[in-house]
Each structure stands twice: as structure tokens, then as C-alpha cells.
Image (cartoon, grey):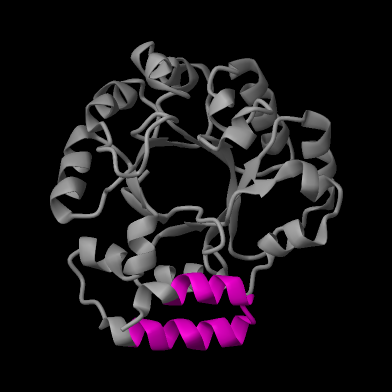
Amino acid sequence: MKFSYMLAPLEDYSDSALRTLCYKYGADITFTEMTMIDALSRSNKGTWSRLDFRDKTPVIIQLLGGNEMRLKKFLKMFKPHKGFMGFNLNLGCPSPKVINVGLGCAMIKRIGKTKKLIKIINNYGYNCSIKTRLGMNKFEKENKVYMNLIEGVDPDFFIVHARHGSQKYTDIPDYSVYEACVKTGKNIIANGDANTKEKIKELKKIGLKGAMIGRQAVNDPAIFNRLKGLDTPTKKQIKIEYLELAKKFESPYRYQKNFLKHFEE
């Protein structure tokens, strides 16, 4: 697996316009917003709209859920488009309302359940990856529950956000955990402030297979090419291109509003 640059799943940002823009400027793979399996299985129109793909940009659909029967029901209804690259299971969401129903970070310890979900997706002929954190809290990080997950299941790759679930985005991610993750022989993608060439160089030296970028990509969708050492457009040009794509793809207003506030003069 070559070193890949990935656009993270971003709630109320990751529509087709942003994904296509980031792909144009160096993102090798993009992700949808976190999407609830239960709602998909019930044919909820608002949830299915998150799987509204307007072009062939490479995209992985991120799923949140743990019910095997509902996952099967959704997969029976699902029809892949040309840019579809597989599914990603969210085992990292730190939201209390998600954790309280046993999902997100609370799934990190549920290795048997995670194995079953991966097997179901694979049996339908689709690739499956996992996005996780360093545990639900400091205690779980110190006891390395994330290592049990990495060693215990076999997705295509792991995206490891180098913070635990009780930490904020202002807390410094702990890159020291990556060496042990890589030594398992699994494909590990870094997540958490991988926003400079120096950090990318550090991650490559450790042996990681890629970097996922989220918040920084909203402020600078061309950050992927910037990290690759390639030429990038001005912020004004980025804004113009985004608006053109948003119009072409009929992006909902909330996505445009959230993105454009980062480009206010």
C-alpha cells in the first residue's frame, strides 16, 4: 500500500463539492460523513442523501452502527457507483450520545462484534477499513485497548486518530503510539494534525501508510498537494471553484454555509 492522503469524514462539510475539490488538489481518497446504519436500513431519505455521489471522485462510505441484521438489510439495498472504494467502520466517534448506545469509541473493545461486521461487508464483495481512537478515555489508552483491536481484526487498513475519546482537538496527538501499531504488520493511517511536510516526513519514517486530514482541509482544500510539494491555487481561486462545484452538484445550503465561513474576508 503506497502512502495515501485522505480527506476525513466531516459532519456537514463532506459533500460531493468538497470531496471533488480536495481530490482535484491531491487527496487520493475521500470519505463521506459518518452515516448511521440503522437509518440507512430504514430507508431514511435524509441519511441516504449522504450517499449522493455526483461524479467519480474516489470515496469511502463511513458507517456507524453495530446491528448485523440492519447492516445486511442496508447492503442488500446498496448499489455502488463508479467512484466507490469501500466502507469504513467508525470506532472513534467520541460523542456522548454515540458512546451511550455502545457505538463509536465504545466499540473499540468489541473485537468479536467488529469481526462480524467486517465479515458481512466482505461477504457482499466490498472492502472495509476501520477508523478508531486510542480508547474511550485516558485509562483505555494507557491499557492499550486499541492495540487489542488492531491485533485482533483484519480490515484493509486502520485509521488511528492519535487521541483518546476524552481529548479535544486542541490537545496534542500522541504520535509515539504509531510505532507499535506499525509493528503489528497492519496498514496504519495517521490521523490528527498531520498538516506539515515535517510531520508527514515523520509519519513516513515510522512506517505509516498514509495521513488523514480533516479540519485543515476545510481551511485549505489544496493542503494535500501542498504536502506533496506541488503547486497550489490561491484561496480566492479555491473559493470560486468550490462555488462552481456547489452549484453544479446542488449542494445543500448548510454545506455551503459551513465551508464558506472559512473564506470570509
What range is drawn magenta here? 237-260
Residue drawn at point x = 45 percent, y = 57 percent: 29
Q: Is residue 45 left or right of residue 141?
A: right
**Which image quarter is the C terminus in?**
bottom left
> Is 247 placed above or below 30 here?
below
Q: Position of residue 65 (x, y in %)?
A: 69, 36
Asked if the magenta segment contains residue 162, the reply would be no
Q: Is residue 3 left or right of residue 104?
A: left
Q: Nearer the viewer, residue 208 or 94?
A: 94
Q: Position of residue 161 (x, y in %)?
A: 38, 37
- Answer with the quarter of the image where residue 48 lies: bottom right
Image mark count: 0
> Is 98 placed above or below 16 here?
above
Q: Is residue 163 visible?
A: yes
Residue drawn at point x = 28 percent, y = 25 percent: 177
- Answer with the quarter of the image where residue 109 lies: top right
Residue drawn at point x = 37 percent, y = 72 percent: 262
Q: Main secondary structure of the magenta part?
A: helix
Q: Is residue 56 visible?
A: no
**Which image quarter is the N terminus in?**
top left
